[in-house]
Image (cartoon, rainbow, N blue to C red):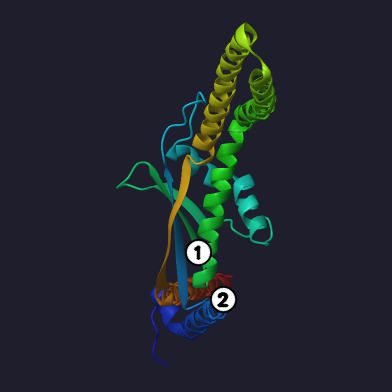
C-alpha cells in the first residue's frame, strides 16, 4: 500500500472525508439559520428639522440632542410601546444621524421586514426622541401656561368692567361722564397689557412645541441574498476549520500511540 504522506498534509489527505463532512455540516447549520431570513428588508427614514431657536429657554433644542436621544434605551422603549411592541423590540433596528446636507435636520431610520413597519419604526423613534427632548422644557412651559391662565382670567374681569363702565357712562352727564371715560381708558390699558401677556406666553409655548418639525417619511428596499450567501460561506469555512482540528487531533493521537 502506497504511503499517503507524512505530517499534517498527509493527515489531511487521510482525513479528507472528515473535513468534507464537517464542511457540509457547517453549511447545513448556516442554511438552517438563514432560511428564515427575509429575502427583502426595508429601511424607513423620518426627517425632523429644528425650525428655529426658541426665544424663552436658556438651552434651546438642537440636532445633536435628537441624535443623542435616539441612543437612549428609555427613548427606544417609549417608541416600541407607542407601536404596541415589547420594550426591547426596536433595539438594533433604529438609529439617527444628522443630515450632512442640512445641519438643522436629523434623519431617523428604522429597519423592518415590511414597508409599513419600516416607516412606522422610523416615525416612532423620531417622535419619541422629540418628546424626550421637549420634556426638559416642562417647567418653562408650565410657567407660560400659568401666565396664560392667570392673564385670561384677568382679561375676562377687565372686559366685564369695561362693559359696566360703558353702561354707567351712557347714563352719566357732565363731569361725571368724563370721569367714566378716564376710567374706561385706564381699564383698556390694563386690558391691552393682559392681552399682550397672553399672546407673548402663547407664542413662547408655540416656539418650543413647534421647534421640531417632522418632515418627509420615506422608505428604501434592499435584498438579503448577499447576507445569506456570506453566512453559507462562513459556515463552510467554520466547518473546514473544525474538520482540520479533528484531523490534527486524530493525527496527534495516532502519532503518540505509535511512539508508545
Q: Residue at x 61, y 54 (%)?
A: 79
* Residue 164 image position (x, y, % from top left): 69, 23
Secondary structure state at the residue bearing disc 1: helix
Indicate which disc, 2 or 1, sits on the residue closer to the N terminus: 2
> Are the residues flagged by discs 2 and 1 in contact, CB closer than 8 Å?
no
Q: Residue at x 57, y 20 (%)?
A: 188
CA–CA distance in space, label 2 to label 1: 27 Å
Would you say residue 71 is visible in this rendering? no
Where is 216 relative to 19, above or below?
A: above
- Image check: 142 left or right of 56? right
Where is 46 relative to 205, above or below?
A: below
- Circle 2 is placed at which residue position? 33
144 vs 258, nearest the viewer: 144
Would you say residue 199 is visible in this rendering? yes
Q: In which image quadrant can residue 131 be found?
A: top right
In the current view of this chain or complex, which residue is farthest to the front? Answer: 173
- Circle 1 is placed at which residue position? 119
Q: Quadrant of the C terminus?
A: bottom right
241 vs 62, nearest the viewer: 62
* Residue 203 image position (x, y, % from top left): 51, 33
User: How would you rate the neighbour count of disc 2 (Cα within 10 Å): few for under 14, some for 14-19, many for 20 or more?
Assistant: few
* Residue 73 image position (x, y, % from top left): 61, 47
36 vs 242, nearest the viewer: 36
Where is 9 relative to 96, above or below?
A: below
Q: Quadrant of the N terminus?
A: bottom left
Which label was assigned to residue 168? none
Q: Residue at x 43, y 78 (%)?
A: 12
In the current view of this chain or complex, which residue is farthest to the top? Answer: 175
User: How would you rate the neighbour count of disc 1 (Cα within 10 Å): few for under 14, some for 14-19, many for 20 or more?
Assistant: many
Amino acid at each position: 500500500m502506497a504511503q499517503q504522506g507524512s505530517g499534517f498534509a498527509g493527515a489531511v489527505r487521510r482525513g479528507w472525508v472528515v473535513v468534507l463532512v464537517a464542511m457540509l455540516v457547517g453549511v447545513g447549520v448556516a442554511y438552517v439559520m438563514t432560511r428564515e431570513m427575509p429575502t427583502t428588508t426595508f429601511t424607513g427614514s423620518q426627517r425632523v428639522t429644528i425650525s428655529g431657536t426658541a426665544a424663552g429657554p436658556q438651552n434651546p433644542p438642537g440636532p445633536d440632542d435628537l441624535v443623542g436621544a435616539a441612543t437612549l434605551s428609555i427613548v427606544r422603549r417609549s417608541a416600541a410601546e407607542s407601536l404596541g411592541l415589547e420594550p426591547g423590540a426596536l433595539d438594533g433596528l433604529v438609529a439617527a444621524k444628522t443630515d450632512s446636507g442640512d445641519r438643522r435636520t436629523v434623519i431617523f431610520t428604522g429597519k423592518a421586514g415590511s414597508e409599513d413597519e419600516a416607516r412606522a419604526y422610523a416615525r416612532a423613534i423620531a417622535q419619541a426622541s422629540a418628546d424626550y427632548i421637549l420634556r426638559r422644557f416642562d417647567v418653562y412651559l408650565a410657567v407660560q401656561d400659568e401666565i396664560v391662565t392667570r392673564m385670561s382670567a384677568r382679561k375676562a374681569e377687565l372686559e366685564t368692567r369695561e362693559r359696566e363702565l360703558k353702561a354707567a357712562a351712557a347714563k352719566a352727564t357732565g363731569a361725571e361722564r368724563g370721569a367714566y371715560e378716564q376710567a374706561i381708558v385706564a381699564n383698556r390699558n390694563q386690558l391691552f397689557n393682559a392681552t399682550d401677556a397672553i399672546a407673548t406666553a402663547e407664542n413662547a409655548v408655540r416656539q418650543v412645541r413647534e421647534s421640531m418639525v417632522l418632515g418627509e417619511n420615506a422608505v428604501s428596499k434592499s435584498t438579503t441574498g448577499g447576507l445569506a450567501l456570506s453566512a453559507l460561506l462562513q459556515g463552510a469555512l467554520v466547518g473546514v476549520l473544525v474538520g482540520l482540528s479533528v484531523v490534527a487531533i486524530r493525527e496527534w493521537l495516532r502519532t503518540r500511540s505509535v511512539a508508545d
